[in-house]
Image (tube, helix red, strand yellow):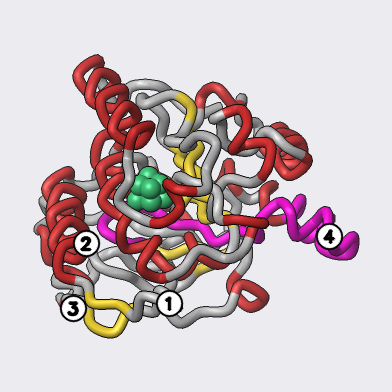
Amino acid sequence: MAEAGRGNSTATASMKELEAQVKTCQLCRLSKTRTQSVPGQGNTRTEVMFIGEGPGYHEDKQGLPFVGAAGQFLNELLGIAGLARDTTYITNVVKCRPPNNRDPMPDEIAACAPYLERQIALINPRVIVTLGRYSMAKFFPGERISQIHGTARMVDGRLCVAMYHPAAGLHQASLADIIRDDFRKLPVYLEQSRKVAAPPIEVAEDRVEEAVEARESVVYEPSTGVVLEEPAPQIREEAAPTLQPTPQPEERGVASSTTPVGRSKRAPKKSDYKQASFFEL
Ligand code: SF4
């Protein structure tokens, strides 16, 4: 089970303010077709945050994430991982339902990004689990979910785990057991994430600023939402990750068949928090 203690009462209050902003947000075209926005749900003191794509029909009606059939499967998957849903925080890349469940457009994702970045900064989770392509693209740019599902990498000092969207297991029965197997790895990933320094809040706050700047300066094609120009991300261009995927077995405290992250031997610097190599259990 996820341990409490990451956030605090100030974070909880700020999350409520953010959720109130999302409820009335009209920054992109999705505000015109939604029934209500879906900011997110869960425990701001969690160590584990789940990020899906966008609300669907039932989520749009209820104002809560993952409450339809995919949500039922997610609940099963959380149980497999030993996580009670109310000890986690669950949200989406876009907070309003795209019409007819179409894919969110790039400009909609850019418009909504500051909310997601602020949620990450408020919670500052040790582990982020991406559910589906759009959240995966944020932390694993250029990768394919069919190739990296169930694997993890360090991004900004936190462990990011790529998972299929639960709906994929509903639409394609052969994927359901693969997704269950991937979720069985989560407890070990969480354990490994506790062996490294806590994610630096400064980096998460920088991400919020970057996302706000991008939202204000992004240039897109109005009819398609395709982003034509956007500022280059700053932190991802920095080098020198210190977290290595192959520590000595005696340092791990877990079965030697795993390939977890190691422990940094010095105080982390902002420039350390960049993507490290993929590793998988
Ligand atoms: S999707 Fe995000 S940016 Fe667009 S209206 Fe909803 S909350 Fe605002």
- Circle 2 sits on which residue? 215
Q: Amino acid at mark 4?
A: His
Residue 55, horizontal then vertical, whole percent: 57, 45
User: What number is the disc on residue 232?
Assistant: 3
Report which residue position mark 1 lands on.
Answer: 223
- For the point 62% across and 66% down, the residue is 149
Q: CA distance from mark 3 to mark 4?
A: 36 Å
For the residue carrying disc 3, how many other residues have a C-alpha within 10 Å: few (<14), some (14-19), or many (20+)?
Answer: few
Tag 4, which secondary structure? helix
Q: Nearer the viewer, mark 2 or mark 3?
A: 2
Of helix, strand and loop, which one carries label 1? loop
Tell whether 58 sits left or right of 230: right
The quadrant in which the C terminus is found is: bottom right
269 or 146: nearer the viewer: 146
The residue at 19%/19% (across/down) is 10
- Any atom of ligand 1 within 8 Å of the CB at mark 3? no
Q: Which mark is residue 171?
A: 4
Q: Is residue 226 visible?
A: yes
Q: Residue at x 36, y 75 (%)?
A: 222
Callout 2: SS? helix
The answer to whether 251 appears left or right of 203 in the picture is right
Disc 4: residue Cβ within 8 A of ligand 1's nearest atom: no
Which amino acid is tagged 2? Arg
